[in-house]
Every structure is written in structure tokens, then in C-alpha cells.
């Protein structure tokens, strides 16, 4: 007897089946032609219902198939056994998937090997590593078997840019930035606007590019990347003020350029532009970014005051840039200025927030992270060459070369016109000299990944491919040509540090040693301080004072300095012996 609930369920199913349009009434017979057609084409109604095998009732349909294969009832007729090839096919399919995975792994391994080779080449030749990485990326992009690598603008602007900005700001000197605030602001704001306008006017007059795309191109090529320049200047011992100005310019001009870029793109897509509206939003975005950066910095500093675990502190420092950048970007403020502000603020307060043990580990982590990110970015820039050339494949090579030369010349000339008058006006800060600073600052306007990422993020419009190509040309020329010729320019200008910074540092060390001695004397009265320990510490700091003062004595024979260096060398050799055990 069929249970009542099953009868009701079958009734509802029959009612739904009868209600569907085109359905045959239950019990009606199909025509013989229709039955033959169904059997021929495998219609479900023409096939017999499968038997219900109790052995597989609870093991699913796959178990039923295996049982029917063993009984010879699976599409092959009665008592015909099928060969068991399921496992072989599965293994074969696995081998095909593994082959694809291995090919991808080999390509990635080849790219990493190429990256290491070009880094080693940079180390051996003394060339700044961005230069061989860009050239090597261009070469690798055309090798057979290398996949088409497309650099996502979102990855650059969201993943790479915040930690790089935070790292540069954290390790910069707030005192030096404040002392050179005038030149930095002129280059980071005034020069960016002048570059955008100058490039737009020149490309519009030469190639006839419409005004809106021309201003987009000007905004794209206006931000600088100081990685190659600061490495060259630091290795050659160039003037500290010059390095500070270049680094400070790059910290702020990214924000200026990206804000101008946003409104230039809006003018292209919407066809309208309001200078007053753009200026007001620019000021609001700048103030908002700085405010958010200060707020995040205050909260993070209050949190890290109560921490004394290097792993936790380093982890917090790695996400601090995103804690400032992402909320600012979401609220319409400048995420770049937020990341820079929080980096400068925490760098200024780092002596009171970071313990010596954490400082050693954190600084090493950030140094490696910044190096890896920069190396990856410059390699990605070079790998974009095939995609960029595909975009302008139908254009005339002569016209493209002319436009690229015009844009590069406009970038250099506008920078020179902005730097030279300001260098003359501020010559007293360079001991009455202006030609050397003006030439060095003019020739260090390298462009980098931010320029190319902004170009690749452009929406579709008629001149998009041309703008991307011209931006790529500016990046390659400034990184390769200016990077290779900058060392010779610094040597020819004799633009080196004169040693006054080292003298100031030596005086500061003397004052610090005197403060330590003054602190030792009151501590002698403590019960836990042994007399011989206090005497030993006092003798150590007195020796430091004698050593540093000897650097100011022209009649000193150098015996103290030689003795100190000999002690340090002996100490290192003893430590090496201890590590060997």
C-alpha cells in the first residue's frame, strides 16, 4: 500500500506536468513515428527506466555505473565487460594539466632568472638597477614563449604605490624637508602644473591632438620617480640638499599629478571642464589627505607605544600605509598625501615608538621590500613594450618618433625653465652657485611606473593608444638616457658634499656622549650600580669624545682614529671566530 503522503506528492507532480503547455496527457499513446524518432535520438521517454540495484542504493550514481559495467549492462549489451580505463584517463588528464602548470612555472622561473641576471649586471657595472631592469624587461617581452604581461593600473596604484610612498616618507628627515620646503613645493606643485600645460600646448600644435587628450598626456608625464637619481647621487656622494629636494619633490608631485590627471580624464569623457571647480576640489583633496594621514599616524603611534614585540610592530608598519591610503581614496581625498603624511609623522616619532631591536629588524624588512617592489615595477615597465607597440601598430613610425621627441623635449625644457630662475633666486643656499644645482635638478626628472600606470588606466577614447605610447617613450628615455648620463654630469659639475654635514653629525655625537657622562654620575649612587662598571662606561664615552674632537684638530696625527679603526677590525674578526663555532 502506497503511503498517503506519496500519493499526494505524485498527484502534485501529475498536476504540474499536465499544466505545462505542449505536454501529452497522461495515458495517451504516442504515434509510432514519434516513438521511432525518440528511440533513434535517445529521447528520455523512449528509453526503459533503469533498474534499481540495491547494492548501490546508497552509494550514488557512480557506484551504479561501476556495478553495471561489471555485469555487462552499460551500453555494451548483456555480459559484455568494459575495460576499466577510468583511472588511466584520469592520470592522463592529470599529466596534461601538470604540463600546463610546468610550462607556467618554467616561464616564471625564466623571468625570475632574467631579473636576477640584470640585477647582477647592475651590481657588476655600477649602473643603477632601474636602467638594466627596464632594458631587460623590453628584451624579455619579445622573447618567444614569454606570455603577454599586462600591467594592471590598479595593482600599481593600490598595491605598489602606498608602501613605496610610506617607506620613502618614513626614512626622510623632517628637518631637511622643512628646511627645503620652498624648492620642494615649487617643483611638486608649480612644476607639475607647468609640465601639464607645456606638454599639452606643444603636442596640440605639432600633432593636432585635441586639447582634452593633450592635457591628459601632460598630467600623465608630470610625476617623477627618484629611484635611479637618488641611488646615483647617494653612491657618488652628491650634495645632501640636492638629494632631499629630489626625494621631497617625488613624495608630493604624485598627489598633484594624479589629482590633475583625474580632472583631465573627466574633461575627456564628459567634454566639460571647470577650472574653479577643479581648483576647489584639488585643495579639498589635499587638505583631506593630510588630515587623514595625521589621524591615522596618531592612532598608530598610540597603539605602538604599548607594544614591545618586533613581529607585531613590523606587521603593523606594513599595513599602516594602506590604513591611510585606502580610506582617503574612498572619501575622495588624496591617498598619496595620506600615505606620505603618516610616513613622515611616524618617522619623526620613531625614536620614542620603536625599540632598538625592532628598529634593526623593521629597517631591514622595509629596505628589502622597497627594493623588491621597485625592481618588480621597473621590470613590468619594460615588459609592457609589446603591448604598447601593438596599440600603435597602424601609425607611421616617422610621425610617432617625431611626437615622442617633441614630448620629451617639452618635458625637459619646461623643467629647465622652472628650475633655473628659482636656482638663481636661491643661490645663497648653494654658496652663491646656481648653475650646478640647476643642471643637476633639471636632469634628474626621471619618470617611472606611476606615469605608465596612469596611462594604462585611461578609458577608451580616440587618442588613448597614442598617449600610452608617448608616456612609455618618456619613461624609457628619462630612465635610461638621463640615468646613464647623470653620473658624468655630477662629476663634471663637481657637485659633491663638502663635508659640513659630517661635521654637524660629529658635533651632535660629542653632545650625546657628554649627556651620557652627565647621566652616569647620578647613577653611581644607586645600589645596583657597581663602581667599576660606572668607571668603565665613563671611560668609553670619554674616549668617544676625544676621538670625535680629534676630527676638528688640524694638528692631530690620526693616532686616535687609527686606534679606533684597529679596535673595530679586531672586534669583527673575533665575532667571526665566535660565529664559526
Image (cartoon, helix red, strand yellow):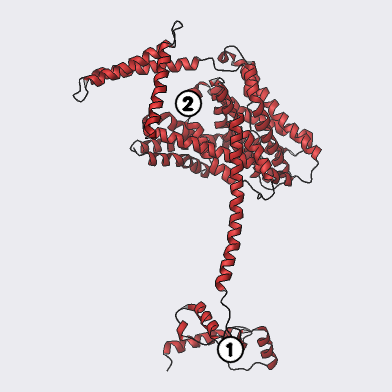
- Quadrant of the image for the N terminus? bottom left
Q: Is tag 2's residue or tag 1's residue first in the polypeptide sequence?
A: 1
Q: Label 2 vs label 1: CA separation?
A: 87 Å
Instruction: Say left or right for 450 vs 1.
Output: right
- Quadrant of the image for the C terminus? top left
Q: How many marks?
A: 2
Q: Which residue is mark 2?
A: 173
Instruction: Say left or right for 509 vs 392.
Output: left
Give the numbered dot on residue 445.
Answer: none
Q: Which residue is at the front of the view, 402 or 93?
A: 93
Tell me the crowding category of disc 1: few under 14, some 14 to 19, or many 20 or more residues within 10 angstroms, Cα based: few
Picture quadrant where residue 97 is located: bottom right
Instruction: Kindly state the secondary structure of the residue where label 1 is placed.
Output: loop
Tell me the crowding category of disc 2: few under 14, some 14 to 19, or many 20 or more residues within 10 angstroms, Cα based: some
**Could you say where residue 368 lies in the image, as x and y percent from the top left?**
50, 37
Instruction: Say left or right for 194 vs 518.
Output: right
Q: Residue furthest top?
A: 555
**Could you say where residue 523 lies in the image, as x and y percent from the top left?**
24, 21
**Could you say where residue 560 lies in the image, as x and y percent from the top left?**
40, 13
Instruction: Kindly state the secondary structure of the residue where label 2 is placed.
Output: loop
Picture quadrant where residue 82 is located: bottom right
Q: Can I make out residue 578 in this image?
A: yes
**Could you say where residue 139 lies in the image, as x and y percent from the top left?**
68, 41
Check if mark 2's residue and mark 1's residue have beta carbons within 8 Å.
no
Give the numbered dot on residue 78.
Answer: 1
Q: Residue at x 37, y 37 (%)?
A: 304
Seen in the picture, residue 26 relative to 538 is either above or below; the reply is below
Give the label, 2 or 1, closer to the camera.
Answer: 1
Seen in the picture, residue 284 relative to 533 is either above or below; the reply is below
Q: Residue at x 35, y 17 (%)?
A: 513
Q: Residue at x 43, y 36 (%)?
A: 362
Q: Can I make out residue 353 in this image?
A: no
Amino acid at each position: 500500500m502506497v503511503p498517503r503522503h506519496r500519493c499526494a506528492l505524485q498527484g502534485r507532480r501529475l498536476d504540474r506536468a499536465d499544466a505545462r503547455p505542449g505536454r501529452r496527457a497522461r495515458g495517451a499513446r504516442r504515434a509510432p513515428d514519434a516513438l521511432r524518432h525518440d528511440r533513434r535520438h535517445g529521447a528520455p521517454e523512449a528509453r526503459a527506466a533503469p533498474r534499481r540495484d540495491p547494492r548501490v542504493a546508497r552509494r550514488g550514481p557512480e557506484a551504479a555505473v561501476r556495478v553495471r559495467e561489471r555485469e555487462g549492462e552499460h551500453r555494451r549489451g548483456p555480459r559484455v565487460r568494459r575495460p576499466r580505463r577510468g583511472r588511466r584517463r584520469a592520470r592522463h588528464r592529470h599529466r596534461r594539466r601538470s604540463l600546463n602548470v610546468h610550462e607556467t612555472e618554467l616561464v616564471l622561473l625564466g623571468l625570475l632568472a632574467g631579473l636576477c641576471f640584470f640585477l647582477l649586471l647592475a651590481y657588476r657595472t655600477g649602473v643603477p638597477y632601474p636602467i638594466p631592469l627596464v632594458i631587460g624587461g623590453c628584451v624579455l617581452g619579445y622573447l618567444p614563449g614569454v606570455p603577454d604581461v599586462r600591467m594592471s593600473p590598479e595593482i600599481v596604484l593600490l598595491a605598489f604605490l602606498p608602501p613605496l610612498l610610506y617607506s620613502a616618507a618614513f626614512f626622510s628627515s623632517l628637518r631637511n624637508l622643512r628646511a627645503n620646503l620652498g624648492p620642494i613645493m615649487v617643483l611638486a606643485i608649480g612644476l607639475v602644473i607647468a609640465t601639464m600645460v607645456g606638454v599639452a600646448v606643444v603636442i596640440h600644435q605639432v600633432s593636432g591632438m585635441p586639447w582634452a587628450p593633450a592635457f591628459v598626456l601632460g598630467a600623465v608625464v608630470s610625476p617623477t620617480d627618484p629611484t635611479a637619481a637618488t641611488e646615483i647621487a647617494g653612491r657618488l656622494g652628491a650634495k645632501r640638499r640636492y638629494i632631499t629636494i629630489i626625494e621631497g619633490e617625488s613624495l608630493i608631485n604624485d598627489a598633484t599629478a594624479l589629482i590633475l590627471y583625474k580632472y583631465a580624464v573627466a574633461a575627456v569623457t564628459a567634454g566639460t571642464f571647470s577650472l574653479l571647480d577643479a581648483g576647489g576640489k584639488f585643495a579639498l583633496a589635499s587638505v583631506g589627505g593630510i588630515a587623514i594621514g595625521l589621524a591615522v599616524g596618531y592612532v598608530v603611534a598610540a597603539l605602538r607605544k604599548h607594544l614591545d614585540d618586533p613581529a607585531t610592530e613590523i606587521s603593523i608598519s606594513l599595513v599602516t600605509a594602506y590604513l591611510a591610503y585606502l580610506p582617503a581614496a574612498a572619501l575622495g581625498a588624496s591617498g598619496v598625501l595620506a600615505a606620505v603624511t603618516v610616513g613622515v609623522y611616524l618617522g619623526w616619532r620613531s625614536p620614542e615608538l620603536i625599540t632598538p631591536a625592532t628598529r634593526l629588524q623593521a629597517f631591514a624588512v622595509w629596505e628589502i621590500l622597497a627594493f623588491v617592489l621597485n625592481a618588480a615595477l621597473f621590470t613590468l615597465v619594460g615588459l609592457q613594450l609589446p603591448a604598447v607597440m601593438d596599440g600603435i601598430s597602424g601609425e607611421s613610425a616617422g610621425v610617432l618618433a617625431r611626437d615622442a621627441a617633441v614630448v620629451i623635449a617639452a618635458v625637459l625644457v619646461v623643467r629647465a625653465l622652472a628650475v633655473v630662475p628659482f636656482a638663481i633666486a636661491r643661490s645663497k643656499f648653494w654658496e652663491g652657485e646656481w648653475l650646478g644645482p640647476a643642471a643637476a635638478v633639471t636632469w634628474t626628472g626621471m619618470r617611472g611606473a606611476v606615469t605608465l600606470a596612469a596611462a594604462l588606466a585611461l578609458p577608451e577614447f580616440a587618442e588613448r593608444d597614442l598617449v600610452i605610447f608617448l608616456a612609455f617613450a618618456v619613461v624609457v628615455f628619462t630612465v635610461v638616457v638621463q640615468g646613464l648620463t647623470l653620473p658624468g654630469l655630477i662629476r663634471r659639475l663637481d657637485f659633491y658634499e663638502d663635508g659640513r654635514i659630517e661635521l654637524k653629525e660629529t658635533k651632535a655625537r660629542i653632545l650625546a656622549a657628554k649627556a651620557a657622562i652627565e647621566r652616569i654620575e647620578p647613577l653611581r649612587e644607586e645600589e645596583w650600580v657597581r663602581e667599576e662598571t660606572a668607571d668603565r662606561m665613563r671611560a668609553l664615552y670619554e674616549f668617544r669624545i676625544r676621538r670625535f674632537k680629534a676630527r676638528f684638530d688640524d694638528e692631530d696625527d690620526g693616532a686616535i682614529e687609527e686606534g679606533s679603526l684597529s679596535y673595530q677590525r679586531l672586534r669583527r674578526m673575533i665575532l667571526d671566530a665566535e660565529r664559526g663555532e
